[in-house]
Amino acid sequence: MLHEKDSIDVLTLTRGAARCDLIPALGGSIAAWSAGGQDMLRPASAASIAARDPFGMGAFPLVPYSNRIGNGSFDWEGHRHSLRLNFHPEPHAIHGVGFERPWEVRSSTANLATLTLQHRPGASWPFAFEAQQRITLAERMLTVEMSALNLETHPVPLAFGYHPYFPRDGAWLKFRAESVWLVGDDGLPSLRVNPFGKFDYSSGMAVSRGDIDHCFTGWGGEAEVSWPGRGLRIRIEASNSLRCAVACIRSDLDGFSFEPVPHLNDALSRPDRAYAMPVIAPGARFDATIRLTALDGAPA
């Protein structure tokens, strides 16, 4: 069902008591997802929608790369590529192009929508690709199937991750990872350590314990967000192509992000390291899936 919200078209999926509001024209983003009347993602505010601010949405796609490309430049096949900077005042490019562009509604039913994006080489990314999101709503589950097709005649870096925001107030986060890359003052990975202290979420931890904005590698593909005292919690599951996760928790925001992603931050400047950016052959695809399941509430 399409309707207008603050002069922008909203595509609403429903299934029983579940609802998911999509805004295809605003970066193919999800404005809100609720199950049984409870917000499972941080809902977009009217101000964020009016301002066309993707960072104010409930979730948005990360394609063709995740997080930052340092100083907006990288080398590929002997050529230096410079990207349009889109995260001022930082001197970096961030989150690809998908969250900034309108997506086409390829098809939709009451509880399923397929969104597509055609990208041609330009200042924001030098390689052509076609991206697709297939978003399916069940009564207690939201599934996002992601695909990016290489339209070039040669192999290129190409990936697809996801950036959900969860309500921060009273939240607990639980997941396991092998390592965490601490972000330096320049916003780029600077130090790899084993998760410990305020970076160890293996037994669950209140997100209010401390602010972080780091990339966890060797993530096991499962995580849990819970809100003690609320009716439902969320289990996050990701496909094997997403074995990194960026956790961004800031005390000045009403939401926090736990982002299933396929590679390390600034991966194109670190080709000799594990968790490099995927390289996709001509005519081939990068595929990934995340599944968010609402479960009866209990502390993480």
Image: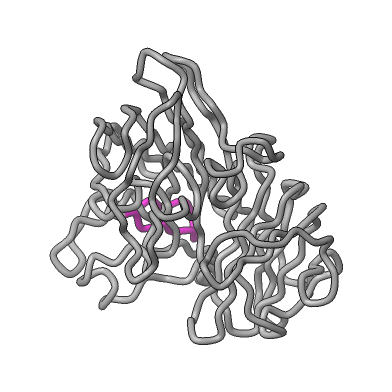
Query: For the C terminus, which image quadrant?
Result: bottom right
Whether residue 17 is in magenta: the answer is yes
Residue 141 is a magenta residue? no
Answer above or below: position of 45 versus 109. below
Q: Position of residue 280 (x, y in %)?
A: 51, 23
The answer to whether residue 173 is seen in the rendering is yes
What residue is drawn where x is 41% and y is 24%?
Answer: 149
First to last magenta residue range: 12-22
Q: What residue is drawn where x is 82% and y is 64%?
A: 195
Dominant secondary structure of the magenta stretch?
A: strand
Q: Which picture quadrant has residue 105?
A: top left
Q: In the picture provided, is 286 more to the left or to the right than 105?
A: right
User: Residue 88 location in percent, x, y?
Assistant: 32, 68
Query: In this orientation, which residue lies closer to the viewer: 126 or 36?
Result: 126
Q: Quadrant of residue 26?
A: bottom left
Q: Residue at x 72, y 57 (%)?
A: 223
